[in-house]
Image: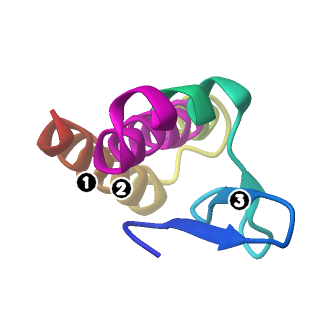
Amino acid sequence: MYKGIKIIKTPNDIKIYNTRKQGLEYREITDEEYYYFLQYGFRTGVNRVLKSTYIDQIEKINNKIQEEVNSRNNKKHYDSLKHRRETLINKYSKLN
């Protein structure tokens, strides 16, 4: 396991899972991401998967912020969402 990416060797092949998606279940990476691992290596592949994961999480938080502003208008929750988004953006920018 490295930065949330888990590699499992089965008797017939090798599976790569992203542990940062879907909470308790590990989700297998896409064929495009497998290709990226084969072409550019392990660390570059991990960075590629993490970037796409961070982008997905940032988009979800942006949607939650819009919902918060349009419906509940709870200042504490809004601030916590902004803080989480800022943290993810910093993690994403450090990968470059």
The quadrant the C terminus occupies is top left
In the rendered image, residue 13, in percent from the top left (x then y), is placed at 78, 58
Which residue is identified by label 3?
Answer: 14
- Whether residues under marks 2 and 1 lie with C-beta atoms below 8 angstroms apart, the answer is yes
Q: Nearer the viewer, residue 15 or 90?
A: 15
Marks 3 and 2, the one that precedes in the sequence: 3
Q: Is residue 93 left or right of residue 7?
A: left
Say which mark, if any, is on residue 87: 1
Query: According to the image, what is the colour scheme of the structure?
Result: rainbow
Per the image, label 1 sits on a secondary structure element best described as helix
Secondary structure, magenta segment, majority class: helix
Asked if residue 43 is among those painted magenta in the image, a careful observer would answer yes
For image coordinates 41% across by 40% down, the residue present is 45
User: Hey, which residue is sitting farthest right in the picture?
Assistant: 12
Nearer the observer: mark 3 or 2; the answer is 3
Q: Amino acid at mark 1?
A: Thr
Residue neighbourhood size for the residue with mark 3, other residues' Cα within 10 Å, grouped as few (<14), some (14–19), many (≥20): few
Marks 3 and 1, the one that precedes in the sequence: 3
Nearer the observer: mark 3 or 1; the answer is 3
Residue neighbourhood size for the residue with mark 2, other residues' Cα within 10 Å, grouped as few (<14), some (14–19), many (≥20): some
Q: Is residue 62 above or below residue 41?
A: above
Q: Nearer the viewer, residue 7 or 73?
A: 7
In the rendered image, residue 58, in percent from the top left (x then y), is placed at 45, 37
Q: Is residue 80 left or right of residue 20?
A: left
Residue stretch in magenta:
37-63
* Real-space CA distance between mark 2 and mark 1, rounded to the nearest whole angstrom: 5 Å
Which residue is identified by label 2?
Answer: 84
Asked if residue 92 is among those painted magenta in the image, a careful observer would answer no
Q: Amino acid at mark 3?
A: Ile
